[in-house]
Image (cartoon, grey):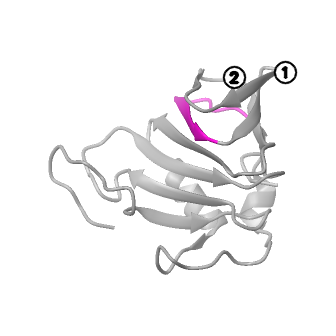
Amino acid sequence: MKSFPNSVIIPADEGTGIWQPGIKGNCITVKVSPWNHTTTQHTVFLHELPKGGEVGEHAHNNGIEIFVCLSGEGILTIDGKDNPFKMHDVAYIDMNSLHRIKAISNEPLKYMVILTPTGLEERLKLMGKTKSDKNELPPENFDSEIGKQSSHGVV
């Protein structure tokens, strides 16, 4: 991943892609993190989650997340309440708030995640398989021991 010293636009086709365990095609592309901007206090990634893909219920005890839906549809459960999540919706997930998300549309649910503080990208990398290039085809479904240990793993 390129390192950026100052303010910058990250082109749509740039970032570190990481296939995630579970459903085939589940991919996270890290756009901004300490990997490419050493002074950032945020991690920003694009999550592409195929129909039926799910991020299990979990909470963060040290930060917040913001989700911005770009396309597709999902169900975002926050503190036990199911909410539709569709294009242009924005979700603010406060610290210690239990949440999960499931893709329900035929097209993949694509949403940006903005996290503060940084660090989750390291766990996602350990759970998954780094893409060798942007045109790489998704691997078959796979499991991850680290993913099994974390409710943040994708099923």
Residue 133 in sight in this render: yes
Residue ID at (62%, 61%) = 27
Q: Residues within 10 Å of mark 2 (few under 14, many from 20)?
A: some
Q: Amino acid at mark 2?
A: Ser
- Is residue 46 placed above or below 74 in the rendered structure? below
Q: Which residue is mark 1?
A: 80
- Is residue 110 placed above or below 35 in the rendered structure? above
Q: Position of residue 152 (x, y in %)?
A: 72, 47
In the figure, is residue 128 to the left or right of 34?
Answer: right
Residue ID at (69%, 52%) = 108
Point out the residue furthest to the left here: 6
Quarter assignment of residue 105: top right
Element class at badge 1: loop
Element class at badge 2: loop
- Is residue 84 placed above or below 142 in the rendered structure? above
Please report the bounds of the magenta region as a residue range. Answer: 58-71
Is residue 67 within the magenta segment?
A: yes
Of mark 2 and mark 1, the one earlier in the sequence is: 1
Is residue 11 within the magenta segment?
A: no
Q: Which residue is mark 2?
A: 97
Q: Residues within 10 Å of mark 1 (few under 14, many from 20)?
A: few
